[in-house]
Image (cartoon, rainbow, N blue to C red):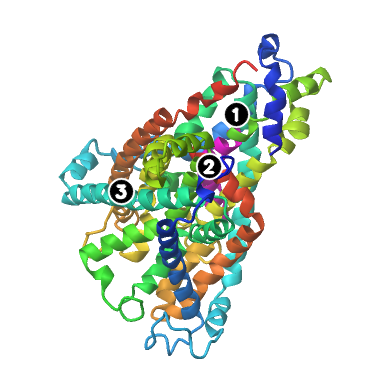
Amino acid sequence: MESPRRRHWTKRANPVAGLGSFIWLLIVLVPIYAMLSASLTGADKALTGNPLRPPSEPTLDNYGTVLDSDFGHLLSNTAIVAIVVVGIVLTLSIPLAYVAVRTRDRWSNAAFRLFLLGVAIPAQAVVVPLYLLIAKLGLYDTLPAVILPTAAFAMPVSVLVLVGTLRDVSEDLYEAMALDGASPLRMLFQLTIPLAKGGISTVVIYSALQAWNGFLFPLIFTQSDGPRVLTLGLFNYVSQFGVNIPALLASVVLSGIPIFAVYLVARRALVGGLMGVGGK
Amino acid sequence: MTTTVDKRQAAPTVPTAPTRNSRVGRPHAVWALPAVLFFTFFAVVPMGLAFYLSFTEWDGLGDPRPVGFANWQKLIDDPRLTQSLSLTVVLTVASWAFQTVVALLLGVWAAGRQRNRAVLSAIFFVPFLLSSTAIAILFYALLDPNFGIIQKDTLGSQSGAFLAIVFVGGWQFIPFHTLIYQGGARQIPEVLYQAAAIDGAGRYRQFFSITLPQLRHTITTSTVLMVVGSLTYFETVLILTKGGPGTDTAILPYLMYEAGFKTYDFGYASAIASFLVLAATGLSLVLVRLTGFGTMRSTREGM
């Protein structure tokens, strides 16, 4: 018998599971490898070679083609959308979650339930009436037309994550501050927010990801080059680059690099926060 | 991390009932109002508006004109609706089966704390970082009959296009569900496995008798998220197949997009959207009931 303190899964190697995870590793990596390899292949050679073979003469021409076609403009639009969305989501969700956890009267419960149900409203279902609202507000074909609904639809999950985190802040700490005569606002800034950093960073990354990867709202609510964001730009490249698939794939790679960089830095916050979603 | 420490410190003082009703230092519910108003305006009001528009005729330019039940009648009579509905159901079930099996196995495997499992888990998560658009374009290129890995017109056949959508959806969302299962599996009390090992239960017996039953709440949550999520395969369908070949992969959201933003029949598009809202509301009620998230607040009640 081995030491009972150790986890059961650390005891012996599991060849079946090892093989299964290796197969999944291939399923994940082969498309990514094919994309990278193809994006480095000259446009003229792409149709003759197999994308799984490494490029014989690697070239960065495709990346040049993409960067020349206003990619920077798409990138800065998307960054603006992501930053403002994160700002709106935090400013609105934190007080709501704070009230839902601390006040717990009829109204704050009702507010929390609204977001609980809101988790399952699919954006597709409201896109037509939202189009009417956006048009009546005079926002059609502007960045706010993308920002406002994106922020609204990032809120339900953000509220759930925040409420889960804020519940873990001990009541005793609040009471200690109440004895000192602290106002709810001071408690929020000096106690709740510092202790809820983990949940808040999950929300930041989650809502930034929603904004960065959102496609439906930009597709329906914008039209011209001015407010075009990255995902819509990629979609347009499909027709613009036509058969120049290496350039198309180079644009996909470029669109993923910023998010990948964030993932490398903040993996723990994202993964840790999302892991708790399922409960036990 | 700080929070677990706090919990332990708080434990001995649980029965201090008098402070429970203290209003001192509690924020007024009105703090929640900005969030509620904002979300209501951009998500709840549009949902109501979708129902209103479904009883009107509107081309997106002038003002909507009431037409009674005409759009709903048209929806019921539309042969594409039956096709699209059954397609949406089959797609949801197929995606659920594929994603649940893979994510559950990978998640339980990744719950182990070995170094190599942590490294592979980090790699497995990468597809989830790309946008649906980017992933759809990637596979659109890889499935191109002239350029791609499979030198065959996969997307040109009905079953090929359908399987491609299931596969691409799984490729994108399995990382997320793996993570949920990994979190769930790590919460299973170690003592259950120790007891089973003493009783001589092998690895597979332990999986079916302990791991699976213990993960039932996780399976529920993940399932509901997958089902609701399968309504958002819109990007994949739009880029990969455009609903084709013919209308063979035209799921409900795609049908709505075509009705609204291709043929400018917004009244009819709203009828389809209202139908989606009904389905989604039903699902969200199931979500709240089955996961019991709404009652979780009671765990710290009375502190």
| Mark earlier in primary sequence (3, 1) | 1
Q: Is residue A210 above or below residue B190?
A: below
Would you call the spot at circle 2 few (<14 residues within 10 Å), some (14-19), or many (20 or more)?
Answer: some
Q: The magenta stretch spans which residues?
A: A143-163
- The residues bearing labels 3 and 2 have C-alpha atoms spaced at a distance of 28 Å
Residue shown at 44%/36% (left/top)? B196
Quadrant of residue B138 within the rendered picture = bottom left
Q: Position of residue B178 (x, y in %)?
A: 46, 50
Check disc 2 and give the amino acid type: Arg
**A124 part of magenta stretch:** no
Check disc 3 and give the amino acid type: Thr
Q: For marks 2 and 1, give the one nearer the viewer.
A: 2
Which residue lies under the disc numbered 2? B186
Which residue lies under the disc numbered 1? B33
Q: Residue furthest front?
A: A1
Q: Secondary structure at mark 3?
A: helix
Would you call the spot at circle 3 few (<14 residues within 10 Å), some (14-19), or many (20 or more)?
Answer: many
Would you call the spot at circle 1 few (<14 residues within 10 Å), some (14-19), or many (20 or more)?
Answer: some
Chain bearing mark 3:
B
Q: For marks 3 and 2, give the one nearer the viewer.
A: 2
In the displayed structure image, the side of residue A18 where residue B90 appears, left or right: left
Q: Assign the magenta stretch its main secondary structure.
A: helix
Q: Position of residue B265 (x, y in %)?
A: 29, 51
| Mark earlier in primary sequence (2, 1) | 1
Check disc 1 and give the amino acid type: Leu
